[in-house]
Amino acid sequence: MGRDASVVGASRSLSSNPRDETIFLVPLACCREVVSFMANPLNPERLEVVILSVDIDWAPDFAIEALIRRLDRHQARATLFLTHQSSALAELDPRRYELGLHPHLPDRLDLASALSTLSPLAPQARGVRFHRLIQSTPLMAELGRAGFLYDASLLIPYQTHLRPFRFPPPLIRIPYAWEDDVHAMTNKPWTLESIDIEAPGLRIFDFHPIHVFLNTDSPSRYEAAKKEGFTLEACRRLQHSGPGTSTFLDDLLAYVHRRRVEMWTLLELAQAVSRGHVPEGCFSS
Ligand SMILES: [Zn+2]
């Protein structure tokens, strides 16, 4: 256990479910602290935030624009992992959107050349998610040496109790449990209940603009749009009318609004980890 052992231990000694029980266990004089602890989104047993991440994945501008408009309408916040220059990403509110990089390393693990292409799109970027979730220990070490604070390339589908960790230190690794195209490969319904959204652990979601536009419900819908070159006409014609990626995003945004859940960017999470406000997993320097 790393630097946050005391934080984790403190919460566990209070209760496994501090929101429901701790208020009855402390003297009245402490109530203010307990209430603030209970309301604290940094509660280490259950990080009370939702994080949206978006892999741009060379989506057509109309799909990116539609997604940004929707997120704007909901005053949502998100981390956008960039793959290319797009006018749809030109005037984003920096208070609500973090820009990260989405390097594609098709032939060999040449991070330096990928970053030299991508970094000008977002010179301040501190985070990366690799296209196709490519990972290796040397690659992550190189990312750390290049000055990045975190990587978010580790998908562990439907796993609860996820925590950030550092490997290799000091790079912060942020695992996530849900991605639209992976959900489309399953037979799970497109509902929040299907992912146990109330379970402890990081709640980080990964959407792709093209899947939101198509309201993708199965890989075949995406493949059909790909065959037609992702033209606006084809994508409109192929939009799914039932439950799918788009309706899932609607449900998630409604949940966030209804439950007044804070939305963070991945950078805010990584910075909270750096400050020791969010407990890390078992490997830390
Ligand atoms: Zn990608």
Image (cartoon, helix red, strand yellow):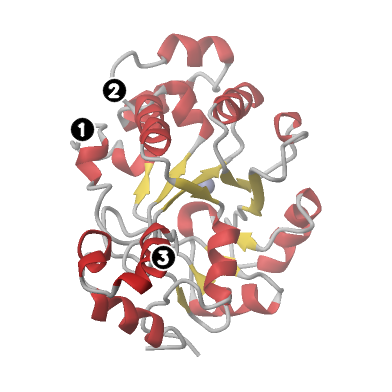
Inspect the image, locate mark 1, and give the three-letter code of the amino acid beneath it.
Pro
- 188 up-or-down from 6: above or below: above
- State the image quarter where residue 282 is shown: bottom left
Question: Dot 2: few (<14), some (14–19), or many (≥20) neighbours within 10 Å?
Answer: some
Q: CA distance from mark 3 to mark 2?
A: 43 Å
Quadrant including the N terminus: bottom left
Mark nearer the N terminus (3 vs 1): 3
User: 91 and 73: which one is in front?
Assistant: 73
Label 2 or label 1, whichever comes before in sequence order: 1
Neighbor class of circle 1 (other Cα within 10 Å; few <14, some 14-19, many 20+) is: some
Displayed quadrant of residue 148: bottom right
Looking at the picture, tell me which residue is in the foreground, 152 or 78: 78
* Neighbour tally class for label 3: few under 14, some 14-19, many 20 plus, Cα within 10 Å: few
Residue 229 % position (x, y): 55, 22
Q: Which residue is mark 2?
A: 243
Q: Nearer the viewer, mark 3 or mark 2?
A: 3
Residue 16 position within the rendered picture, expressed as x and y whole percent measured from the top left: 20, 70
Query: Disc number at residue 189?
Result: 1
* Residue 19 drawn above or below residue 262: below
Quadrant in the rendering for residue 107: bottom right
Location of residue 259 with respect to 20 vertically, above or below = above
121 or 25: nearer the viewer: 25
Q: Amino acid at mark 2?
A: Pro
Q: Residue at x 60, y 45 (%)?
A: 80
Instruction: Name the mark on residue 32.
Output: 3
Measured from the top left, where is residue 267 in percent x and y? 60, 60
